[in-house]
Every structure is written in structure tokens, then in C-alpha cells.
Image (tube, helix red, strand yellow):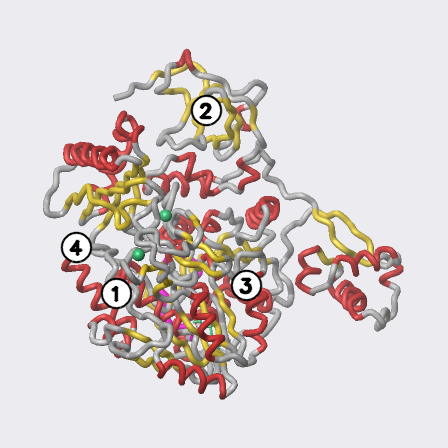
């Protein structure tokens, strides 16, 4: 037990960006008055031989550190707190819940530039305005240059435009410069301030809600905390409900925060919001540089941005007037961070909305079983949309038994015929295969040798462009051998299908058609995705082939056929969430078919057409599948009926990881003895035991109640941190793990 000493003088308790589950005490820096010491202020401090920037948590007079050894903080970065008390408390709560060092959790909430010592203040930004001469121009001037005329017209109606406005209007900066040279336009530097609600809030009329949509929409209470599950098939009009709920929020002078999956934040999504509202919207996406990200963050904090759309970490955006939180595709795995601060943005959103007293809407066509369970139990208000919105009808799903079929590079003849028919009718086809590369691996036909990765328990994927073998788990790469390394035979061949191979095959089968491949490799460059999709959005017949990147956020008006090459991929996964994920993915992909007037059709190729999970999914849909899996989870005592935590350890020597977990288990059992409602499992090897030359093991902790699990974990974490064994392995705690691997 540590004891506290009471000091005569004031001390600062500071969270530092180090992986230790504690805070650090410092003496006040010179020349600082106490009123500058607001919690949330960033402070530069000495730490060992380096300097770090930390977050002030509080001022106090007691310390567990030895008073003689206390050092003085160096300087306050900015006396305006970077984090307000709401976000500060949320981060500290989350650090505690997810067993993460407080300084590390706070790092996630802060934009990179603030962490590096930049002041948390908005810069002035250049805006374009008309000069007196420009204002004097008659209507219809500059007709000979349509872009110049467009800029002039925009400035006449909107008084001023910033750079982002120019981009939205598709007016190149050079046009602005020409008008500046002509003396018609000038640049002023202005500091943005929150604008009053515009008279014309809406840029387009909202759609008239269907009865079902209206029924869901009318239940939302904007003045209290409540979590709503908006459960509606793809295309059932969930986004329209978000838009109308946001409209209500904006009208009350409040802001909306919308989280979308990592690959769901497409220009299309953004445009839809921008078309609807004449208000500043910021998007926090991976394409922003640090400065742009900080600007967006500050605009949200100062109330300039009224709608904030972003991926996982945008949950920590400060809001001046928070009004509503929305999480689209709430089941998506990207809302859970898989390393460091392993938080779930979805679950934390509920905590944040609760503290703010505002509504949270979780939307999905295939809700996670945790969320579904909460809705069924009545903890969340359950809003359901059963029909598709507008004229679209649900796609017809056809299960294609491919046992014993002769497949043409993975395609059954019936699938090829259906693709041909669809193209002949002038429609588009989407072929789904959740494996990038050319083929899952290389095999020797004579001796059975397989291209294993030397560093992982995994096969190396064959890639053709450029030609190489690539391990998708540790990134190891090597050339494709001409002869078998084991028996020297030249008969080595790629086996199985990847997206590159399907692209080649489809191009051979349909030589006159355009085949567009969308996966991580083909979309690596900036804007590559947009360029690839230009042809799709033109509406001409084409074949899209790709991975789950195609399953989210896209709206393909002319896709009428979806072919799923291998429906069985998730069926025999050792992760207990395998079946749930399979169902979600298949339905999300299927949902790309027939989103508008044209009817959609889905072909599911399967070797296990009799499997009860496949049968249930196809015959009765996702919710029947969910019921089935929930029932199983209840019997096997898994989430959402139980709470799980994983203690993971990895090391170059398997024995070190196993030893560490064995000791951890003993420590844990001392703190909380095993009993029917509280159990331990392990140490067990992870699903991929060796990865990147490290051996990976885990200890599962399963509890019927949240509280004893939390108590155990926080004590265990501190004991492990102090243990010498912990220095020999890499270890981490994952609370509510999503990936069991
Ligand atoms: P989801 O978010 O559930 O996939 P969307 O809100 O994107 O659904 O709606 C799917 C399509 O249906 C969109 O093209 C949308 O414009 C249209 N839509 C939505 N609601 C209505 C409505 N009430 N009346 C007519 N069309 C609608
Ligand atoms: Zn061989
Ligand atoms: Zn590897």
C-alpha cells in the first residue's frame, strides 16, 4: 500500500503519454497563477531526460511520491483548457473501464498538433470577397469564362467564400486568382465565428417519410438521454431519418455528431449531408492533414461546425452545444480500436450521450447481437423499418449449391449465365470475394508443399500486380519461386480465388465489358476509390469485383445482381463471432443489389447449403439468424449474456508468454476465486499462434456481472504492471474484445 504525504504547497496531478496506469505529480511552473491551472490545460513537464506534454487533471496538496523528488512543471502551453471537463471525464472514465493508462486515453482524444504543443485556437482563414469594382459588375458579366462567371455569381449571393467552398463549387483556385488580378475579388483574413441559424436551413426538401419511417422518427426525444436502435434493411431509409433528426437538432441550435465505419465515409455520404443542410459541416477522415484535423476539431469545439461526421476517434470531438449522437452501421468492427486504448466508440457513445443527456441513435441493417439484445431487453428503444424506402424492393436471394459442380475459376455456370444476362439487359453486376490478391496461396502439385510464411502460422497470398508472395499478417514479402522449394518440381500453382484472379477471369469471360476491381490494393492512392467508381456511377453496364470495401456506404443505383463467390468463409471460424459476422457481411453485400427502381437478385455460392445457419439466413433473414445465435450464446455463456475480458501476451519465446499468463491467472484467482459466475480459461494459444515471429497466448476471463470483472481487472493490471515478468512479454488487456484471435 502506498501512503500519501500532505504538503504545504500546491501540486499538479498530470496525465502523461506513457503506458503506465497512473498519473504524475509536479510542482507548479514558475510565474503561473493558480487561476491558469484549469483541469484540461496542457502542460510541458520534464520526464526522465525528456520533456513531455501532459494534461492537467487537478491541483492538490497531497502526493504518494516522495516530496523531495518532485520536479517542477516547465510551462503551460495555453491557459485555455484543451479538453473541457466533459471530455476529460469521459476519457478518464474510459481509461478506467478499458484498463488503459489515463495519459494514453487522453492522447486519443487530442489532435496530434495539440499533443505537440500547438495552442488550441482557431486561426484566421482567408476568404474571398468582391471588391467594390466586383460588386459593380452587371449580372451576366464574364460570360465568356463560365468558371469565372460561376465564382462571381456565388460571391454575389453568398458574400464570401472560403477555400473549401471553392472546392465544393468545383472552382479552381487559379480562377479566383485571375479575378483578384482583375481587381474584382480580394482576399480577407477572418477568424471564423459561429454563424446564426440561416433563414434557409435546408438546401433541399426532406423526403416525405413513409408511415414506418415516421413512426420511428416520431419516437425520438431530443431533450433526454435514450439509446435508440434504428434497425432497418439496407435502403429502408435510415439515413433519411438521421437527416430529419439532425434537422430537429439544428433547429434547436444544437450540434450533431455522426460516426460512420472507417470505409463508410465516402464522398457520397458527405455530399448527401451537404446537399441537405446550409450549415458548416466538418468531416474527420483519414485524408486530412494534422492542421486540417485540428481546425475541424476546433470548429466543432467553438460551435462553428454544426454537423461533425467522422470515424471512430471522432467520438472524442469536443462539442459546444451537443444535441445528438448517431452511429451508422453500429455493428461495424472498426468502431472498436484493436490496439493501445482498446475502446469501443459505440459503447462509449452511450456513456457520452448519457452524461450529456442527449439521444443516441444506433443504426444498422444487421445490428450486433449486443445491441440487439439490449433492444429486445428494453434497455434501448427499438425502432424498426421493415420495408425498403421509395420504390425499391428487397433483393431475392438464391442459394446456389456448388457441391460437385465444375467451377470455372470459382464461378458456377449458373452464376456466369446470370452475369451475362444482367449485362445484356444493360445493368451492373457486383462480385464479392473477401480475399484480396490473386490466390490465397501457392501449392506444389507433386508434393503438396504450400507457401507458408516463415514468421506466422499463415499462408502467403499470391499477388500478380506486382508479382510476389505477401503475408497479410506480418507484411513479409518474397518472390514467387519457379520451382518447388521442397521437391524441385516445376508444377507449382496458385490455389483458390482472390480478387485479382476473379478480375482476370471475368475479363476473359466478358472481354467487351468493363471490369472494375475494388480492394485495398487498387485503392491505395488518394482518391483512387472515387476514380474507380466514376464508371460505376455513369450507369453503363460493368462488373465490379471486390472485397468488403464494396459492402459499406456505397449506393450503386444500377447494380441488380450480386454474386457472392464463397458464402461459407465465416461458417467454421473458431471465433465465436464468426457466424454473426458472416451473416452481417453477406446481408450488407446483398443489400447493394437493387437499391432503386430496378429489382435486385443475389446469388450465394455455397458448399454448405444445408447448414442451419446458411438456411436460416437465406430463408428467414438476419433476425432469425440472430435469434438462433443468441440462443447458442446463452447456452455457451458468451456475450451478450456474459462479460468477457482477454489478457493477451506475446513473446518470441512461447514459454515466456505462457508463464506470464499462468502467473497472471494465479494472481487473478487470489483476487477473485473462480466460481460458476466467474471463470477463467487459459492460457490458450491465440487463433494464429505465431505471428510476426511472436508467439501469442491469451487468458479469457468470463463474468456474469460487470462489476466484479472491473474490480478484478483494475487490481490485476496494477499488479502485473509492477511484476518483473511483465517486462519479458508484450501484454495487454482487452475489455469486451471483438476479435478473439
Ligand atoms: P438506408 O440508410 O437505410 O440505407 P436511405 O436513407 O439511404 O436508406 O434510403 C435509401 C433510398 O431510398 C435513398 O435513395 C433515399 O433517397 C430513398 N428514400 C428514403 N426515404 C424515402 C422516402 N420516405 N420516400 C422516398 N424515397 C426515400
Ligand atoms: Zn513439391
Ligand atoms: Zn507472416
- Tell me how far mark 1 sits from mark 3, CA to CA: 30 Å
Say if mark 2 contacts mark 1, CB within 8 Å. no
Give residue 12's mark.
2
Q: Position of residue 301 (x, y in %)?
A: 55, 47
Residue 361 on the magenta span = no
Q: Which residue is mark 3?
A: 529
Q: Residue at x 18, y 64 (%)?
A: 631
Mark 4 Cα shell of 10 Å, populated few (<14), some (14-19), many (≥20): some
Q: Could you tell me if residue 448 is visible in this image?
A: yes
Q: Which residue is mark 1?
A: 571
Per the image, label 3 sits on a secondary structure element best described as: helix
**Along the viewing direction, whichever of 425 and 406 lies nearer the viewer:** 406
Task: Please report whichever mark, 2 or 4, sits nearer to the chain's N-terminal start.
Answer: 2
Residue 230 on the magenta span = yes
Q: Which residues are magenta?
A: 222-235
- What count of labels does the image hold? 4
Q: Which residue is mark 4?
A: 637
Label 3 CB sits under 8 Å from any ligand 1 atom:
no
- Tell me how far mark 4 sits from mark 1, CA to CA: 20 Å
Q: Position of residue 47 (x, y in %)?
A: 47, 22
Label 1 CB sits under 8 Å from any ligand 3 atom:
no
Q: Does residue 350 lie above or below 552 as drawn?
A: above
Left or right of 291 in this view: 55: left
Q: Residue at x 49, y 35 (%)?
A: 40
Q: Residue at x 37, y 54 (%)?
A: 460
> Of discs 2 and 3, which sits in the foreground?
3
- Tell me how far mark 2 sits from mark 1, CA to CA: 54 Å
Say if mark 2 contacts mark 4, CB within 8 Å. no
Given the current orientation, which residue lies at the most extreme top position? Answer: 68
Amino acid at each position: 500500500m502506498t501512503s500519501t504525504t500532505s504538503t504545504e504547497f500546491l501540486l499538479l496531478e498530470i496525465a502523461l503519454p506513457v503506458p503506465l496506469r497512473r498519473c504524475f505529480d509536479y510542482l507548479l511552473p514558475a510565474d503561473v497563477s493558480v487561476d491558469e491551472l484549469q483541469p484540461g490545460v496542457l502542460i510541458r513537464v520534464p520526464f526522465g531526460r525528456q520533456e513531455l506534454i501532459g494534461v492537467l487533471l487537478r491541483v492538490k496538496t497531497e502526493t504518494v511520491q516522495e516530496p523531495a523528488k518532485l520536479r517542477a512543471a516547465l510551462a503551460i502551453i495555453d491557459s485555455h483548457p484543451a479538453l473541457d471537463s466533459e471530455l476529460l471525464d469521459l476519457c478518464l472514465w474510459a481509461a478506467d473501464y478499458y484498463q488503459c493508462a489515463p495519459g494514453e486515453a487522453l492522447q486519443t482524444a487530442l489532435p496530434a498538433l495539440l499533443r505537440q504543443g500547438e495552442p488550441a485556437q482557431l486561426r484566421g482563414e482567408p476568404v474571398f470577397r468582391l471588391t467594390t469594382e466586383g460588386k459593380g459588375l452587371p449580372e451576366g458579366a464574364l460570360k465568356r469564362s463560365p468558371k469565372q462567371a460561376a465564382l462571381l455569381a456565388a460571391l454575389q449571393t453568398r458574400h464570401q467564400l472560403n477555400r473549401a467552398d471553392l472546392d465544393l463549387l468545383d472552382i479552381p483556385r487559379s480562377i479566383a486568382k485571375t479575378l483578384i488580378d482583375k481587381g474584382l475579388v480580394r482576399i480577407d483574413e477572418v477568424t471564423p465565428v459561429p454563424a446564426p441559424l440561416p433563414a434557409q436551413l435546408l438546401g433541399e426538401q426532406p423526403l416525405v417519410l413513409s408511415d414506418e419511417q415516421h413512426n420511428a422518427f416520431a419516437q425520438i426525444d431530443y431533450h433526454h438521454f435514450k439509446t435508440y436502435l434504428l434497425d432497418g434493411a439496407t435502403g429502408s431509409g435510415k439515413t433519411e431519418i438521421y437527416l430529419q433528426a439532425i434537422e430537429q437538432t439544428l433547429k434547436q441550435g444544437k450540434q450533431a455528431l455522426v460516426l460512420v465505419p472507417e470505409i463508410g465515409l465516402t464522398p457520397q455520404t458527405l455530399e448527401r449531408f451537404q446537399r441537405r443542410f446550409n450549415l458548416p459541416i466538418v468531416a474527420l477522415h483519414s485524408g486530412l492533414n494534422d492542421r486540417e484535423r485540428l481546425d475541424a476539431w476546433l470548429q466543432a469545439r467553438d460551435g462553428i461546425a454544426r454537423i461533425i461526421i467522422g470515424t471512430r476517434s471522432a467520438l472524442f470531438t469536443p462539442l459546444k452545444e451537443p444535441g445528438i449522437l448517431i452511429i451508422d452501421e453500429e455493428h461495424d468492427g472498426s468502431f472498436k480500436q484493436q490496439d493501445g486504448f482498446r475502446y469501443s466508440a459505440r459503447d462509449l457513445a452511450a456513456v457520452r450521450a448519457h452524461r450529456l443527456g442527449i439521444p443516441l441513435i444506433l443504426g444498422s441493417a444487421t445490428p450486433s447481437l449486443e445491441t440487439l439484445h439490449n433492444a429486445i431487453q428494453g434497455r434501448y428503444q427499438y425502432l424498426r423499418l421493415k420495408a425498403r424506402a421509395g420504390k425499391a424492393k428487397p433483393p431475392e436471394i438464391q442459394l446456389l449449391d456448388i457441391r460437385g459442380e465444375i467451377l470455372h475459376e470459382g464461378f458456377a455456370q449458373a452464376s456466369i449465365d446470370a452475369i451475362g444476362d444482367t449485362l445484356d439487359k444493360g445493368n451492373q453486376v457486383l462480385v464479392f470475394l473477401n480475399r484480396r490478391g490473386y490466390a490465397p496461396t501457392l501449392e506444389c502439385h507433386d508434393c503438396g508443399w504450400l507457401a507458408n510464411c516463415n514468421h506466422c502460422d499463415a499462408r502467403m497470398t499470391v499477388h500478380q500486380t506486382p508479382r510476389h508472395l505477401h503475408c497479410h499478417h506480418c507484411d513479409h514479402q518474397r518472390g514467387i519461386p519457379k520451382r518447388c522449394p521442397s521437391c524441385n518440381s516445376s508444377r507449382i500453382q496458385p490455389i483458390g480465388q482472390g480478387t485479382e484472379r476473379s478480375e482476370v477471369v471475368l475479363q476473359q469471360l466478358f472481354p467487351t465489358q468493363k471490369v472494375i476491381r475494388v480492394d485495398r490494393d487498387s485503392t491505395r492512392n488518394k482518391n483512387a476509390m472515387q476514380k474507380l467508381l466514376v464508371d460505376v456511377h455513369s450507369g453503363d453496364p460493368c462488373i465490379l469485383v471486390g472485397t468488403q470495401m464494396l459492402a459499406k456506404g456505397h449506393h450503386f443505383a444500377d447494380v441488380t445482381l450480386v454474386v457472392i463467390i464463397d458464402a461459407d468463409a465465416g461458417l467454421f471460424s473458431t471465433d465465436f463471432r464468426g457466424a454473426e459476422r458472416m451473416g452481417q457481411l453477406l446481408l450488407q453485400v446483398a443489400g447493394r443489389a437493387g437499391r432503386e427502381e430496378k429489382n435486385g437478385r443475389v446469388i450465394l455460392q455455397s458448399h454448405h447449403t444445408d447448414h442451419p445457419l446458411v438456411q436460416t439466413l437465406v430463408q428467414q433473414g438476419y433476425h432469425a439468424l440472430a435469434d438462433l445465435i443468441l440462443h447458442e450464446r446463452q447456452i455457451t455463456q458468451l456475450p451478450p449474456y456474459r462479460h468477457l475480458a482477454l489478457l493477451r501476451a506475446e513473446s518470441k519465446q512461447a514459454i515466456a508468454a505462457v508463464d506470464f499468463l499462468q502467473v497472471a491467472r494465479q494472481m487473478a484467482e487470489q483476487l477473485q476465486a473462480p466460481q460458476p459466475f466467474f471463470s477463467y480459461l487459459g492460457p490458450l494459444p491465440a487463433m494464429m499462434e505465431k505471428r510476426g515471429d511472436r508467439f501469442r497466448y491469451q487468458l479469457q476471463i468470463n463474468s456474469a456481472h460487470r462489476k466484479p470483472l472491473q474490480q478484478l481487472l483494475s487490481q490485476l493490471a496494477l499488479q502485473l504492471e509492477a511484476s518483473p515478468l511483465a517486462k519479458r512479454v508484450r501484454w495487454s488487456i482487452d475489455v469486451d474484445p471483438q476479435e478473439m484471435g
